[in-house]
Amino acid sequence: FIPMDDPTLISRQQLFARIVGGLGGRAAEEVIFGEPEVTTGAAGDLQQITGLAKQMVVTFGMSDIGPWSLMDAAQSGDVIMRM
């Protein structure tokens, strides 16, 4: 067992906070410039957020369906559920 004060442990709430923070740049563009003028500037942020969200579900089992780990089946795009 790892102690609770281990800095390598990240809670679900902390991960959600990272996602919200990462979406801030895109939201700011929409507010400041309007939806028609949104740029590609947030592309890197969106890639990181997508990867993090996928990790939360696929690797860490942090989804509403329960503590399931999902794995890609041989790069085919199919997903396998494992408890």
Image: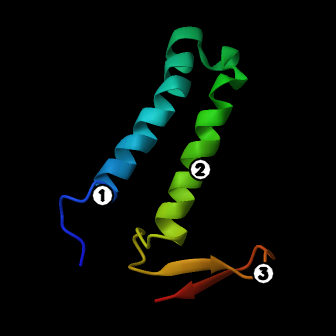
Q: Extreme left residue here? A: 4
Estimate the spatial distance between the alpha carbons at disc 2 and disc 1, rounded to whole Å: 17 Å
- Kindly identify which residue carries mark 3: 74
- Kindly identify which residue carries mark 2: 50
Residue 62 coordinates in the image, percent (x, y): 40, 68
Q: Secondary structure at mark 3?
A: loop
Residue depicted at x 18% and y 58%: 5
Q: Extreme top residue here? A: 33
Q: Where 3 sits versus 27, above or below?
A: below
Dot 1 amino acid type: Ser
Looking at the image, do the residues carrying marks 2 and 1 touch, with CB atoms under 8 Å apart?
Answer: no
> Of callouts 3 and 1, which one flags the residue occurring earlier in the amino acid sequence?
1
Estimate the spatial distance between the alpha carbons at disc 3 and disc 1, rounded to whole Å: 29 Å
Foreground label between 3 and 2:
3
Q: Is residue 33 left or right of residue 20?
A: right
Looking at the image, do the residues carrying marks 3 and 2 touch, with CB atoms under 8 Å apart?
Answer: no
Estimate the spatial distance between the alpha carbons at disc 3 and disc 2, rounded to whole Å: 21 Å
Residue 34 coordinates in the image, percent (x, y): 59, 14
> Of callouts 3 and 2, which one flags the residue occurring earlier in the amino acid sequence?
2
Q: Which mark is residue 11?
A: 1
- Image quadrant of residue 49? top right
Q: Is residue 47 left or right of residue 53?
A: right
- Image quadrant of residue 81? bottom right
Q: Is residue 3 left or right of residue 33?
A: left
Q: Where 75 sits versus 38, above or below?
A: below
Dot 2 amino acid type: Thr
The crowd level at tag 2 (other Cα within 10 Å; few <14, some 14-19, many 20+) is few
Q: Secondary structure at mark 1?
A: loop
Dot 3 amino acid type: Ala
**Number of numbered discs visible in the structure rendering:** 3
> Of callouts 2 and 1, which one flags the residue occurring earlier in the amino acid sequence?
1
Q: Where 22 sits versus 77, above or below?
A: above
